[in-house]
Image (cartoon, rainbow, N blue to C red):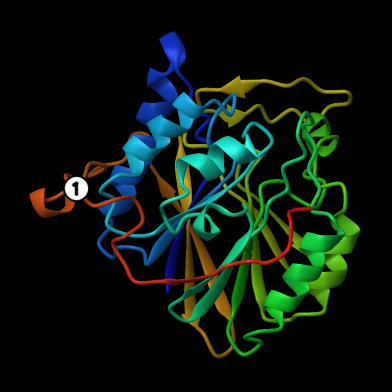
Amino acid sequence: MLLAHLSDPHLTTGPLAGGPAAGLHAALGRLLGLPTRPDAAVITGDLTDHGDPDEYHQLTELLTGIPLPVYLAAGNHDDRDALLDAFAETTHLAGGDQAHYAVDLPGATLIVLDSLLPGQGAGRLGTDQLAWLDTELSQRPEIPALIAVHHPPVPVGIPFLDGIRLLDADALADVVGAHPHVVRVLCGHVHRTINAPFAGTLITTAPSTYRQCALDMTTPGTMGYLDEPTSFLLHQLTDTTNGTCITHTVPVTGAAATQFTLRPAEQDKPPGTGRSTVVRRTCSPAG
């Protein structure tokens, strides 16, 4: 099973809209041009820069016709209601009810969490969502599980980001630690690729499809974003019995064969309808 992991496109409108849109478009083209096409993709938050409905409309246009499911997580730059409204008719987000949901992929379970805390840079899951996560992870303990959440639950060594990470990380660790079939926790927010141990598994943050965070490890540090080369991650489950997961970095900027042209028959497909998947609707409010 192959799962592409993109993050932080920060789509916007107006004079600055071209760069973020071109970045996501190039990443999707690179993804679709791979010799082995992924079974699905996940984008771990900050889908838009301001959470504006017009920005989400731009996202729907970029995803229209993509011949594989693309699952979306909310980030601190997003607006939960606008996101749900934009994708209410698709399987991206639990039928438009809430922004956390579980998906049965071939040989794996993908659980997308909602760490958006309106008005704040940091994130929180809340007790209700964590209880739901514990229940979902108990459903298929024999199948490897991947958890996608925007905010990383561990310090990443960049001070300004460490101050706005997941606030209830210890509670998430308690849940994840009780389920050894969790093979990865997939995060965004950092705009860089970082790996760190967490609750018996591994945290992996994906780079941005637009700009990367300055690697400033000084204290207090500065917040800055650079036009460094972009990429995305490809998580490969090679042994679903033992939960062996290998993560590849796929360059986008400057890479050969980055473009893929949709076939005419695929042009009118709504986003995320290229493969058959099952989305289990959730029944608890986001924390």
Q: Position of residue 200 (x, y in %)?
A: 78, 73
Q: Quadrant of residue 213?
A: top right
Q: Is residue 210 visible?
A: no
At 80% from the left and 42% from the top, the residue drawn is 165
**Residue at the left extreme, as displayed:** 264
| Drawn side of residue 10 relative to residue 113, left or right | left
| Residue on which the image places disc 1 | 268
Q: How many marks?
A: 1
User: Relative to 127, is 214 above or below?
Assistant: above
Q: Position of residue 262 (x, y in %)?
A: 17, 48
| Drawn side of residue 200 relative to residue 142, left or right | right
Q: Amino acid at mark 1?
A: Asp
Pick the front one: 12 or 206: 12
Q: Quadrant of the N terminus?
A: bottom left
At 17% from the left and 53% from the top, the residue drawn is 266
User: Relative to 150, is 227 above or below?
Assistant: above
**Residue at the top extreme, as displayed:** 15
Question: Label 1: few (<14), some or many (≥20) within 10 Å?
Answer: few
